[in-house]
Amino acid sequence: MDGNPAARMIGWWHGVRASVRGSLLLLVVACVLPVALGAALAIVEAYREGRASLFERALSSSRSMMGVVDGELRYAASGLQLLATSPSLARADFQAFHAQASLALAFHGGNNIVLSAPGGQQLLNTLVRFGEPLPMHGDPALLRRVIATGEPQVSDLFIGGVTRRPLVAVEVPVKVDGRVAYGLAMGFFPERFEALVSGLRPDDDWVVSVFDRHGTIVARTHAPERFVGQRGSPALDEAMQRSDSGLVEAETLEGVTVLAAFSRSPVTGWTVAVGIPKEALLAKLQRWVAGLVAASLLLMAVATVLASRIAARLARSMRSLVELADALGRGEPIDAPRQSLREVDAVAQALLRSSNLLEARTLERDTAHDATAAARMDATRMRHAAEHDVLTGLPNRARFVEELEARVEECVARHEGLAVFFVDIDDFKPVNDRYGHLVGDELLRDFAARLKAGVRGTDLVARLGGDEFAVLLQGVSPGEAQAIAATLAERLSAPYSVQGTGLRVTACIGIANCPADGTSAMQLLAVADAAMYRAKAAGKGGYAMAANLVR
Ligand SMILES: Nc1nc2c(ncn2[C@@H]2O[C@H](COP(=O)(O)OP(=O)(O)OP(=O)(O)O)[C@@H](O)[C@H]2O)c(=O)[nH]1
């Protein structure tokens, strides 16, 4: 048993009796399947690349949005720093500063400007008319950081003291005589940042969120009223805690699966996250897959139809070849009409040539056979004519002598008895003379028949010529021969009726016995002839043994 799987496979393949149609369909599947698989792999690869490219776009978008947010805050800080140098502040002329701050606010996207004492008491708020009572600083921690560092600071999301709404602020220190005398802040509503990042999105589906240093949503392009103030989705939140920028597949707070990228600002510690719905990518993939499936099915259908047609055509051609071959096998003449397939046509023409050749050979053989049969018939006829008498149909002298020679040899070898009768009609000439030769002929035929009927079927009766006949009796003793001759002479002398004429003739029989009277055909015939003459001499109508004359 061959253990090689490849050899076993080849062996199995050779053992399979497949139809043309089945083989062609297998070919179709074998061709289409790898193409479809290749296309599927290409789609998967394209999906991977598309995913990577989307991540890349999301990341670069998050960086550029972060830059814009940073720019806005920086711009606010620089505006505040400029405002902080106002002589009105040095003079503590807050009313004049209120007017200056309100004017400066118009050049920024901020909501208000607030001046606070180091202890947290708001001294001035552009949202409130000068002189009216003011609340405490909304984000005391921010003020403390500003005082502690002497540098501009950006807040986290907090609830504004006047607006009672979530907002963020940029605050700078106002130094008088070298020490921080106030905190000057510009507040922003989340909508300001929403507007900034929204304008940078290439697609409205993109979900962009701006987070403060603690991961709280400061602004959001989608449903800000629901989610500002909350933390991001757990996966994104976790990723943002781990690193300053990165990529993550996560669900938004609404439950939409997105490919998200985030970047943290090294300046403010804020983070911008951009989420691109995966659905768009999947929809594209679905379109590709649907296209691939449709193309594969179409290709398969077209190929199957073509294969079926080719198979049907081949099968038809093959069937016609089988019919031709069967007809050829039966030896029938065949007609091979032109086939549409070149190879099949070549076989059909070859079968036609074979048929023609076979027909020609058969004709030749039949002709030769007919000639042989005719020749054989002629030879048989000639042989028969050469060995038989035309009138009576009995073997003639030559045949009788030939047979006698053979039988004599046998009898001598076996020590068996054999007798030869020489029979001659008495006074036949007068019959001819009186009744004519036709009557004579008829009488000769009747005589021959009676002679034949008077001996055994195995005995050979021959006409030697004229009115002379001979009989060969094998296996008889001289005594038996004599008895047979006596009976025969008796029967032969009974009246004949020829053409309505009653005739009476007798015959003389000369008997020679082998081996007593001779051991050769000619010898025995001559002895019998002599005995017959002796019988005639004795008075006709009798028989005579070679040695003795009886009656
Ligand atoms: N009708 C007919 N006659 C034949 C034929 N052959 C020989 N003969 C005749 O047979 C006759 C024989 O006569 P013969 O030999 O003289 O003998 P026979 O007349 O019988 O006289 P015996 O023999 O002495 O008794 C001849 O007249 C032949 O012409 C034949 O085929 N047909």
Image: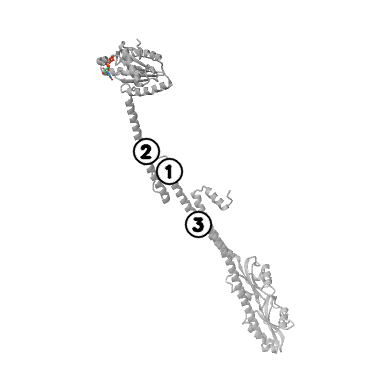
User: Which residue position holds label 1?
Assistant: 325
Residue drawn at x 41%, y 23% as measured from the top left: 410
Q: Give me the disc on residue 299.
A: 3
Please tell me which of labels 2 and 1 falls first in the chain: 1
Quarter holding residue 431: top left
Residue 317 shows up from this direction: yes
Q: Quadrant of the C terminus?
A: top left
Check the image and report above or below for 95 versus 464.
below
Q: What's the CA distance linking mark 3 and mark 1?
A: 38 Å
| Disc 3 residue type (three-letter) | Leu
User: Which residue position holds label 2?
Assistant: 365
Helix, strand or loop at label 1? It is helix
In this view of the protein, which residue sits in the foreground, 525 or 202? 525
Residue drawn at x 48%, y 51% as measured from the top left: 308
Helix, strand or loop at label 3? It is helix
* Residue lying farthest to the left in this orientation: 433
* Residue lying farthest to the right in this orientation: 119
| Disc 2 residue type (three-letter) | Arg
Please tell me which of labels 3 and 1 falls first in the chain: 3
Q: Position of residue 542 (x, y in %)?
A: 34, 12
Please tell me which of labels 2 and 3 falls first in the chain: 3
In this view of the protein, which residue sits in the foreground, 139 or 287? 287
Q: Quadrant of ligand 1?
A: top left
Quarter holding residue 429: top left
Check the image and report above or below for 214 versus 152.
above
Q: What's the CA distance linking mark 2 and mark 1?
A: 22 Å
Quarter holding residue 166: bottom right
Query: Quick check: is the Cβ at mark 2 less than 8 Å away from ligand 1?
Result: no
Q: Is residue 112 left or right of residue 295?
A: right
